[in-house]
Image (tube, rainbow, N blue to C red):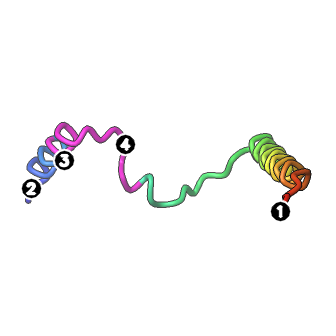
């Protein structure tokens, strides 16, 4: 397959499937490194998300713990 034929085939695939970015870019991990500020923000986000999850779980257990079952 020539270079021109390959490019035409890829363009047709993108036009038909509506692909907007390279599928391999979604599969392979990036080799870039986020800045220290971005790394810190991501770590803060992870901690906040974990705290929120723990709060939700604790609240649900409190609700279920306050229920009394009658026979």
Please tell me which of labels 2 and 1 falls first in the chain: 2
Q: In this figure, which residue is indicated by the disc labeled 1?
A: 71
Give yes or no for contact between labels 3 and 1 (Cβ–Cβ under 8 Å): no
Q: In this figure, which residue is indicated by the disc labeled 3?
A: 10
Q: Whole-Å distance between the Cαs marked 4 and 1?
A: 61 Å
* Kind of element beneath mark 1: loop
* Residue 45 % position (x, y): 78, 43
Please tell me which of labels 3 and 4 falls first in the chain: 3
Viewer-side label of 4, 2: 4
How many residues crowd around disc 1 within 10 Å: few (fewer than 14), some, or many (20 or more)?
Answer: few
Viewer-side label of 3, 1: 1
Q: In this figure, which residue is indicated by the disc labeled 4?
A: 21
Q: Which residues are magenta?
A: 12-24
Please tell me which of labels 4 and 1 falls first in the chain: 4
**Between 67 and 71, which is closer to the camera in this rendering?**
71
* Kind of element beneath mark 3: helix
* Kind of element beneath mark 4: loop
Q: Whole-Å distance between the Cαs marked 3 and 1?
A: 69 Å
Please tell me which of labels 4 and 2 falls first in the chain: 2
Viewer-side label of 2, 3: 3
Q: In this figure, which residue is indicated by the disc labeled 2?
A: 2
């Amino acid at each position: 397959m020539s270079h021109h034929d390959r490019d035409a085939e890829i363009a047709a695939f993108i036009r038909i499937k509506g692909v907007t970015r390279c599928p391999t870019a979604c599969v392979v991990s990036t080799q870039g490194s986020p800045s220290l500020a971005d790394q810190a923000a991501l770590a803060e986000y992870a901690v906040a998300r974990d705290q929120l999850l723990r709060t939700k779980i604790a609240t649900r257990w409190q609700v279920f713990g306050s229920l009394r079952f009658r026979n």
